[in-house]
Amino acid sequence: MDAHPGRPGKQEPGAAAPGTERIVELEEEVSQLKEAVTSHAVVDQAIGMLVAVGHVTPAQGWDVLREVSQHANIKLRHVAELIVIWGGGGELPADVRELLEATLDRYGPAQLPEDPP
């Protein structure tokens, strides 16, 4: 055991190395930024699908996503993921599909195709 525990150059057992806490903070921030970029890409893809099938502008596509998310009580990113999956040949849950069609109808007549675009 060290007779001088507070002495410079010596680290107490269990103490974090200098700068370790900052490194952990930066790694967490990088992880959050990567997730945000991925989320942004999925949302943009979903907006593109709404523009194509719903004949709305990109700004209206954003509004449609936001409204469906709020009324379905589903995170916007998840709604976007469902739309992108549907566009790739997947299923769109019936409740989300109904909300999506109703919301798109407020921006002009829209009927989603039975099969993904």
Image (cartoon, grey):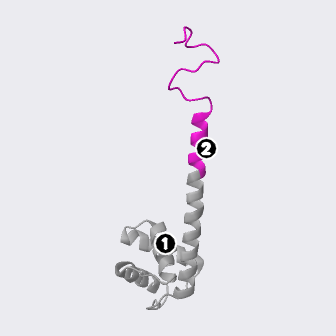
The answer to whether residue 111 is magenta is no
- The residue tagged with tag 2: helix, strand or loop? helix
Which amino acid, mark 2?
Answer: Leu
Disc 1 crowd, CA 10 A, few/some/many (<14, 14-19, 20+): some
Q: Nearer the viewer, residue 67 or 44?
A: 44
Q: Going by the image, does 100 lie left or right of 15?
A: left
Q: Residue at x 47, y 70 (%)?
A: 66
Q: Position of residue 20 (x, y in %)?
A: 59, 34
x, y (%) of residue 73? 37, 67
Q: Which residue is mark 2?
A: 26
The answer to whether residue 48 is seen in the rendering is: yes
> Is residue 55 among what the camera can see?
no
Look at the picture and state if 21 lies above or below 4.
below
Tell me the chief SS of the magenta region. loop
* Residue that carries the numbered disc 1 in the rendered image: 81
Which stretch is magenta?
1-30
Q: Considering depth in this image, is 34 or 50 the residue closer to the camera? A: 34
| Numbered label tally | 2
Residue pictured at 59% horizontal, 55% vertical:
33
Q: Nearer the viewer, residue 15 or 21?
A: 15
Question: Please, is residue 93 above or below residue 38 in the view?
Answer: below
Place of residue 27 in the rendered image (x, y in percent of width and height, measured from the top left): 59, 46
Quadrant in which residue 114 is drawn: bottom left
Residue lying furthest top: 3
Q: Residues within 10 Å of mark 2 (few under 14, many from 20)?
A: few
Q: Disc 2 to disc 1, how far (Cα)?
A: 28 Å
Query: Which amino acid lies under the numbered mark 1 shown in the image of this protein?
Result: Glu
Secondary element under disc 1, as helix, strand or loop, is helix
> Which circle marks residue 11 in the picture?
none
